[in-house]
Image (tube, helix red, strand yellow):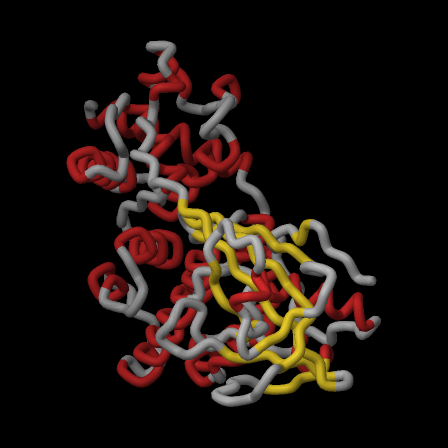
Amino acid sequence: MSHRNMRRIATKLTAWFARNARDLPWRRTRDPYAVWISEIMLQQTQVKTVIPYFERWMRALPTVEAFARAPLAGILKLWEGLGYYRRVRNAQAAARHIVNGRAGRFPEAFEDLLALPGVGRYTAGAIASIAFNQPAPILDGNVMRVLSRLFGVAGNPRGKAVNTKLWALARELVSVRGIEPSQLNQALMELGALVCLPRQPKCAACPVRRDCFARREKRVGEFPAPAPRTPVRRRRFIAFVVRRGVRCLVRRRPHGEVNGGLWEFPNIEIPVNTKNPAAKTAPYSIAPGGPFCRVRHTITNNRILLEAFRATLIHQRGLRGAWKTIEEAGRLPFTSAHRKVLEAVSVMLKSPINSPATPAKSPRCSGCRTD
């Protein structure tokens, strides 16, 4: 596409963004730390979910120095419910690098941002463009969809050849002279979030509809091409709720494992079609009556069923964990699924959870019984 056409598109996008941008808390600042935190929270997570997390985070850890010094348990508690916990661990490693290796000065150059732990090409581009107004391109799911339709880029947008072409288009747009990179990149993201939707896009409201290849050719539904589907894997876990007076047995997942450092009830994975879970439970003995809570949730291509049972201990050999009241457990960072079990136990024991966090939308607890 000609430079003139690119300028026309960029001008329309930024003018539309100036009129239609949502008032989001991270858009009220150019602080690179705040921009960075918002971007890592927004990965794989909806904006409406992130807003209270971001606001609470910035109250608790308003600077990169505060983040670098914070204990891991406190960070995980602030992050509890957002999932993909590796993001926040990498982010703290990056914060410590900034504080210890750069005297607290946030890097401005794209290559320096890209060198931070956990910062990829998209996040580095977002910080460089939004916080420092540099012409660095971005390409997330929303922008892929917008550019694929706008320029008629066929094929899987995450495939190497197509992805390279989309990055080149993003760079060409953000490099148009006289256009603020910060506004252009945010306009692309906002258009994908509000107008150029995956299904039933609002083409009549699109500021670049007359330039859009997919709309002109009446092929909007063909772009972007769907990625190959990953086969669904079904998994089943049973959790044991063991009480000792007003305390329950909980344990922290080992660091280095998935969700390392988070807390959970003791649990085991069993074959999906197991008919008698009680035969698989040593050193726990499941009480009669079946599970009192079922939680269904999804992690990538895993469809997981977690069933919580009342249980007692047969023996304590090799037992790992700690005895906590519901109030004490509520102050610990739990995995999202086990947080739902904790909530069900709280209702069952009529003991409120004393938690400073406001959880995100958690996996549904279906079939809970509190009798």
Identify which residue is drawn at 39% across, 66% down. Answer: 86
Closer to us: 135 or 35: 35
Q: Look at the picture and state if 299 lies above or below 98.
A: above
Tell me residue 311's x, y (percent). 66, 73
Closer to us: 249 or 215: 249
Q: Look at the picture and state if 219 lies above or below 186.
A: above
Q: Give left or right: position of 183 versus 157.
A: right
Residue 292 visible at all: yes
Tell me residue 106's x, y (percent). 34, 71
Closer to us: 341 or 150: 341
Tell me residue 308's x, y (percent). 64, 63
Identify which residue is drawn at 47% across, 76% down. Answer: 253
Residue 172 visible at all: no
Q: Give left or right: position of 43 versus 56.
A: left
Q: Residue furthest top?
A: 217
Image quadrant in which the N terminus is located: top left
Total numbered badges shown on the rendered structure: 0
Q: Look at the picture and state if 353 lies above or below 7.
A: below
